[in-house]
Image (cartoon, rainbow, N blue to C red):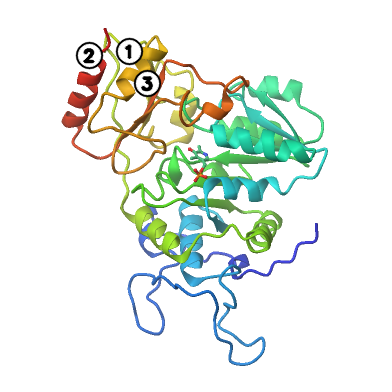
Amino acid sequence: MTIEPESRSSEEAETPAGWGFSTKAIHAGQDPESTTGAVTVPVFQTSTFAQDAVGKHSGYEYARTGNPTRTALQTALAALEGARFGVSFASGLAAEDAILRLLEPGDHVVMGNDAYGGTFRLISKVFGRVGITWSAHDLTDPAALDAAWPENTKLVWVETPTNPLLTVVDIAAVAAVTARRPQARLVVDNTFATPYLQQPLAHGADIVVHSTTKYLGGHSDVVGGFVATDDADVHDHLAFVQNAVGAVPAPWDCYLTLRGAKTNAARIVDLLVGHPKVERVLWPGLSSHPGHAAAKRQMSGFGGMVSFTTGSRESALLVAESTELFTLAESLGAVESLIEHPGAMTHASAAGSPLEVPEDLVRLSVGIEDVDDLVADLTQALNRIP
Ligand SMILES: *Cc1c(COP(=O)(O)O)cnc(C)c1O
């Protein structure tokens, strides 16, 4: 593919190196607006920009190609990931689609055997149709991946912690295996951890992808996606696809995501260990979790996502349908707590595949309500299990 970087976003994000995480969230890419001094980045709700003469303009021509609200969001999120470049999309899956367009027929994608169902559906059902092959591996065993390395692998797709089983993959270990094949790149879906807890580029990842719908948006009011990278070739590809395909986030959505990234804070709550109706609790913060050591190395906290099993599909559905504060809904990573049954909801598309999830699994996204109220709500729901 010929790469024509033609988007304003191809400019490298410039953020002072010494800024801390919170300062970047508030100020990176967000200088007061130049004509009015508006302190908050305005919603530039316009499709086009006036030109002084042909080709003489402010840097913005047409809003699919570039929009100042989007530039601010891209700059801020890139700064949070410690990345040179950031590119925003209309959804997490649109962001993943743009990365996967790096591939050509005959190329291979290595996936984990546990991942977000929509990622699996995109790789297997959409890219599978045009000659991209895939295989699912236990990425917690990088030596096994090294030994089984499929020919023509161009992307290794890691999610850590995974959705919904909270498996932790050692990013540096998989990066070392991937780096032995110069034609392959390592992608890390950082949706569950957020850059606050984990910055995959620092551990050797080439590309970081987010569903900003989740923690980065943080308020269950916007759908979006984001990709960060230090690789100028990858960035030029992404900026080209962003403009050429057009799955761009609206200015208002960029504004909401930028605002959400400033205010959201995950509260880690371990509600479940010790309850007699809970069989297994999946949370990387537990010392019994197989990925605990890797999580401690690469994450600064363990996140607000907790999954658990109840022994049967019926009891899992009963709990998911019996809470009051935990809202029964797909999605995650917002100020309000959510509960769901992955087998029937978010991961239904993985049924019958190597990525199928247990039928007695319940997934929680713990929000920032008072912990005592959340514990009481979940306890009454669990106590309904006969
Ligand atoms: C939700 C999710 C996605 C997809 O993002 P959308 O914004 O829903 O398109 C990708 N990866 C993970 C881990 C997710 O949870």
Q: Residue at x 48, y 18 (%)?
A: 290
Tell me residue 258's x, y (percent).
Answer: 40, 59
**Residue type at mark 1?**
Val
Q: Earlier in the sequence, mark 3 or mark 1?
A: 1
Q: Which residue bears the numbered disc 2?
A: 383
Q: Which residue bears the numbered disc 3?
A: 286
Q: Is mark 1 within 8 Å of ligand 1?
A: no
Q: Residue at x 39, y 9 (%)?
A: 311
Residue 169 visible: no
Spatial CA span between label 1 and label 2: 10 Å
Tell me residue 186's x, y (percent).
Answer: 65, 40
Q: Which residue bears the numbered disc 1?
A: 278
Q: Is mark 2 within 8 Å of ligand 1?
A: no
> Left of 316 or right of it: where is 107?
right
Residue 370 vs 289, above or below: the answer is below
Q: Residue at x 61, y 33 (%)?
A: 120
Q: Earlier in the sequence, mark 1 or mark 2?
A: 1
